[in-house]
Image (cartoon, rainbow, N blue to C red):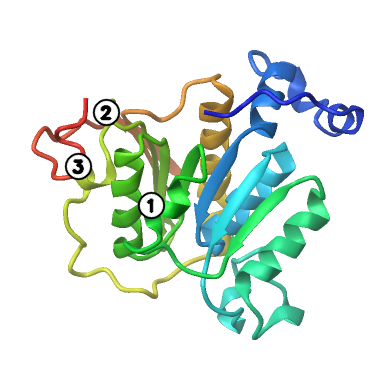
Amino acid sequence: MSKRIPLTDEERAVYEWQMWVDDFGEAGQKKLKGASVLISRVGGLGSVVAYELAAAGIGTLVLAHAGNVKSSDLNRQLLMTHDWLGKPRVESAERRLKDLNPRLNIVAVAENVSEENAAGLVEQVDLIVDCAPLFEERFAMNRQAVLQRKPLVECAMFDLEASITTALPGETPCLACLTPEKPAAWTREFPVFGAVSGTVGCIAAMEAIKVLAGFGEPLTGKMLTFDLRDMTFSRRSITRNPACRVCGNVA
């Protein structure tokens, strides 16, 4: 897990207000500085997760996202800008994050997560935040999270609804426990408001911060769902599938 690296005077000034939080303090800030996080896709969800983690003082972000910025990205992908249309998404994300936090170390990977690269990406980090829209990517990350015993914050959205849980291998359900196969009706493009992906993105960032710094109560063994159409939120317990093909034999 994350290392405790001494803070500079500049960092103490920048993060002063969040270090006033009970059970976090300077010790928690040092853990964030020594921590690394993989974010799969820096789109509607991932842009907000990355921005909030950069603002909070995370040490290293590994960003994996292929392709160039398109006009249809601009309603929700807050690290993309109009002047960057037609240019690589990860480059836009990197420059925007560096503007916010020049101390941040960024590993920008112009690829989406796949079975071929998942192991190498996951082994670089302490924690994963899954913001990918495709189940092939999500399954590849989940498998490596279990194999490498890395915490994974799993978040998803559709229309005005979203869900989030935090998986700890060997302790909580993994993605395959909850969704063993790709849903037949799922498509690459779907209805989305940036405010919805931003809401779940902020929650996902907070989950990552809690796990890495070791305070608060993460959504382990819990699923938070919400529908912003009528502003209803609910939290329910979820359990591991002992016959899960991914984590069933992990203790």
Find disc 2 in the rendering and name its residue: 170
Residue 51 lies left or right of residue 49; in this view the side is: right
Residue 237 lies left or right of residue 154; in this view the side is: left
Dot 2 surroundings within 10 Å: few (below 14), some, or many (20 or more)?
some
Find disc 1 in the rendering and name its residue: 119
Tell me the kind of residue under disc 3. Cys
Q: CA distance from mark 3 to mark 1?
A: 20 Å
Q: Position of residue 181 (x, y in %)?
A: 17, 57
Q: CA distance from mark 2 to mark 3?
A: 12 Å
Task: Please identify the residue farthest to the left as the structure is shown.
Answer: 243
User: Mark 2 near mark 3, Cβ–Cβ under 8 Å?
Assistant: no
Q: Residue at x 8, y 38 (%)?
A: 243
Q: Residue at x 45, y 67 (%)?
A: 112
Q: In which quadrant of the rendered view does residue 173 lie?
A: top left
Residue 222 against residue 90 in the figure, above or below:
above
Q: Secondary structure at mark 1?
A: helix
User: Mark 2 near mark 1, Cβ–Cβ under 8 Å?
Assistant: no
Find disc 3 in the rendering and name its residue: 177
Residue 169 against residue 230 in the figure, above or below:
above
Q: Secondary structure at mark 2?
A: loop
Q: Is residue 230 visible?
A: no
Q: Is residue 121 visible?
A: yes
Foreground residue, 184 or 181? 181
The answer to which of marks 2 and 1 sits earlier in the sequence is: 1
Residue 69 lies left or right of residue 170; in this view the side is: right
Q: Residue at x 59, y 66 (%)?
A: 76
Tell me the kind of residue under disc 2. Gly
Tell me the kind of residue under disc 1. Ala
The answer to which of marks 2 and 3 sits earlier in the sequence is: 2
Q: Which is closer to the viewer, label 2 or label 1? A: 1
Q: Position of residue 212 (x, y in %)?
A: 55, 29
Q: CA distance from mark 2 to mark 1?
A: 18 Å
